Image (cartoon, helix red, strand yellow):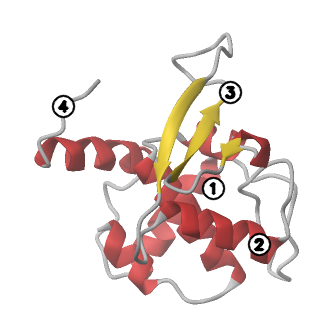
């Protein structure tokens, strides 16, 4: 499903953001609150893939931090390439990685968490997919299902 959504995205500013958002959400199995809280300063860029620091999450309310790998590989589903493209085209050097984009293509300072599910459903609809049971949590659960089908055990 994710590959179909990514393949259907146009080449514009909002789609560049959405590509990065959806790929990071899936490959890091992040909650929507973790996605919108992600800052440029939380990205440790390495040649073989990045390490993302999740500063605070539902399972880490005291903010001890969690390190999550973000893979780098060839092809249109590469999350590190998608984030790099978004940061470059949006000229974001610090602060929140994912931000709202207005109808005039003006980039806001944040992205409200409820928008993550809306973005996923909108993009899935445009890709011709059934979105009835799709939510922001689908990125996280989709990763878990994909890992299980590939024979990868949970840590």
The residue carrying mark 2 is 88
Q: Position of residue 82 (x, y in %)?
A: 57, 69
**Figure quadrant of residue 53:** top right
Question: In this picture, is 29 found above or below 98?
Answer: above
The residue carrying mark 3 is 55
The residue carrying mark 1 is 115
Decide which of 112, 50 is in the foreground and name it: 50
**Figure quadrant of residue 39:** top right
Write the residue at 42% across / 51% down. 27
Q: Quadrant of the N terminus?
A: bottom left
* Label located before the other in sequence (4 or 1): 1
Q: Position of residue 49 (x, y in %)?
A: 51, 52
Question: In this picture, is 122 found above or below 144?
Answer: below
* Label located before the other in sequence (1 or 3): 3
Q: Quadrant of the C terminus?
A: top left
Q: Nearer the viewer, mark 1 or mark 3?
A: 3
Marks 4/1: CA–CA distance: 31 Å
Q: What SS does tag 3 mark?
A: loop
Decide which of 90, 103 is in the foreground and name it: 90
Write the residue at 42% across / 42% down. 29
């Amino acid at each position: 499903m994710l590959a179909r959504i990514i393949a259907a995205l146009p080449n514009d500013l909002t789609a560049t953001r959405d590509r990065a958002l959806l790929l990071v959400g899936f490959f890091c199995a992040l909650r929507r609150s973790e996605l919108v809280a992600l800052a440029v300063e939380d990205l440790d860029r390495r040649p073989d893939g990045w390490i993302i620091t999740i500063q605070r999450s539902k399972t880490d309310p005291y903010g001890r931090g969690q390190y999550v790998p973000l893979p780098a590989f060839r092809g249109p589903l590469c999350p590190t390439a998608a984030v790099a493209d978004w940061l470059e085209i949006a000229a974001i050097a610090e602060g929140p990685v994912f931000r709202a984009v207005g109808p005039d293509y003006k980039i806001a300072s944040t992205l409200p968490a409820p928008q993550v599910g809306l973005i996923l459903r909108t993009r899935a609809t445009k890709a011709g997919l059934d979105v009835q049971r799709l939510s922001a949590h689908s990125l996280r659960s989709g990763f878990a299902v994909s890992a299980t089908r590939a024979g990868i055990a949970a840590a």
